[in-house]
Image (spheres, grey):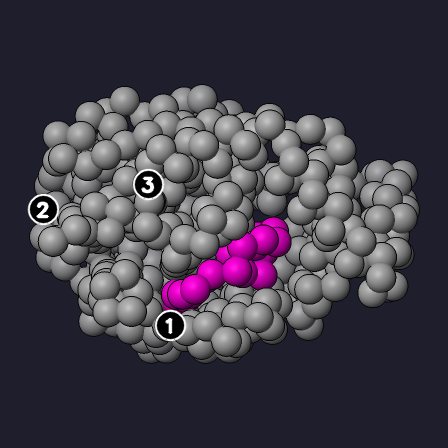
Amino acid sequence: MHKPRLLITISFSFSIRYIIRTGLLQCLQTFAEPVIVLTWNEPALISELKEKGIEVHVLEEPEKEQAYVDIRRKIDFWFDHFKLRGRYKKNQQNYLDQYLPFKNRFIRNLRKWFNVSGFYSPSYERKIFKQEEKLLTGSAAYENISKWVDSLKPDAVFTTTPFHRQEDLLLRVCSHKGLKMITAILSFDNITKRGWIPVPYDVYMVWNKENKEHLLKIYPFAKSKPVHITGAPQFDFYFQQDYLLTKEEWKNVVGIPANNNKKVILYAGGPQALFPQEPMYLQQLDKAITNGAIKDVIILFRCHPIDRIERWKDAIGNSSNIVFDASWTGNEKMGNTNITDADIMKLCSTLAYTDVHINVCSTMTVDGSAFNKPQIGPAYLNTAKASHLLQQLYWQEHFVPVMETRGLMLAKSEQELMMHVNKALQQPELYTNANDAILKSIITFRDGKSTERVIEIIKHALIDD
């Protein structure tokens, strides 16, 4: 029996975790012939997949002509202005604007209105999209990828990152050829925080009901297609004991001395682009431990996958209170690396064996809730205005369900941060009663079977249809 050839794109480290480490890819092999397309060269991963009999190809993002880049930029402005119009949409931009000089903000806004104004005319909008399609399909890059796709002979496409520019041309070609297009949106913030998804898909999968509502609002044509709420396959690891190291093994992996039995605060750092001042919270916590305001603890600092751990080490200097732990970060591009089972086991164990979790407006709040840990979010800066902007940042469209549970405790001053940390260390049950609500609001299911749901939907789309 002929198995349908399923072209699967991977353009981001987290897609490896979702597609490969969950076991999804292995299950797909039972009813389909996976054809992996990587957008960067990852030799160890490629060898691993080929040993399992999986076809792998590397496709670098093709160069686009300047005329196409220019018109696509107009569409990006259109998408941001006309489609991403949620109640909380401006919160992140308002927050980031404090770091941008007035002249730069003025030029940016001028450029925005110059590009957006014409779209108020329906005829202009139709003209721009028609031009974009013509420039795209008439390019040499389009023709080359079209021939390449023909050589692969796929029957369908599966992507977790339909908004990635690295995949854009490939996905457009496949859609134009009439292949069955399937997408499972990688994360719960992608629909409202990522760019335009140019391809209409035959099947959509999302984490929760808010994701579905946002998807249908932004892309009305999706109302005629099945949109499934599957939960988050990458959270399945958290409900499996097999992904936990022993506490002794975990300490050795992250660098905590074996004889250190103090409680551990997990501080999960954010990226510099969003939080340039964030190291001050780690400095303040370090000082509080040194001064005895917080007793008998150490801090395990986990660097964000797209941040430099050196900026944190430079800010702190030498400290016996902090252990620094790097996450999965690529050498050439931060978001491109091979996430291994060992990486996932370290993360699961870190979430399980630490006592209090601190992060600024991060998905790690949801991850930590899966292990029923107190969640604290610093929400103050050096001025009242800056603090207000940071507090508003927590209320972004995708994060609203978390905030409405009141399970994330915001610390609105240095004193509040230390108070909440001490209280959470001593009486964690006061901070964990909404963890289940956080999980339900974001990942929907807490049964560890989201991967199974995704597999069944793909199987139905490929076989049963």
Residue at image position (33%, 62%) is 232
Q: Earlier in the sequence, mark 2 or mark 1?
A: 1
Task: Please tell me whether mark 3 or mark 2 is closer to you in this view.
Answer: 3
Residue at image position (68%, 72%) is 87
- For label 3, the crowd category at 10 Å Cα-Cα, with few meaning under 14, some 14 to 19 and many 20 or more, is few
Q: Which of marks 3 and 2 is nearer the N terminus?
A: 3
Give the amino acid at mark 1. Answer: His
- For label 1, the crowd category at 10 Å Cα-Cα, with few meaning under 14, some 14 to 19 and many 20 or more, is some
Residue at image position (52%, 76%) is 223
Q: Is residue 46 above or below residue 248?
A: above
Q: In which quarter of the image is residue 53?
A: top left
Q: Distance between the residues labelled 1 and 3?
A: 27 Å
Q: Which residue position holds label 1?
A: 228
Residue 122 coordinates in the image, percent (x, y) = 83, 65
Residue 137 coordinates in the image, percent (x, y) = 62, 40
Residue 93 coordinates in the image, percent (x, y) = 71, 53
Label 2 element class: loop
Q: Which residue position holds label 3?
A: 153
Asked if the residue under mark 3 is in contact with the one under mark 1, i.e. CB atoms within 8 Å, the reply is: no
Q: In this view, does 123 lie above or below 360?
A: below
Does the rendering let one see residue 198?
yes
- Does 202 appear in magenta? yes
Q: Which of marks 1 and 3 is nearer the N terminus?
A: 3
Q: Which residue position holds label 2?
A: 246
Left/right of residue 287 with respect to residue 69 in the rendered view: left
Give the amino acid at mark 2. Answer: Thr
Left/right of residue 421 with respect to residue 67 in the rendered view: left
Identify the magenta region.
187-208
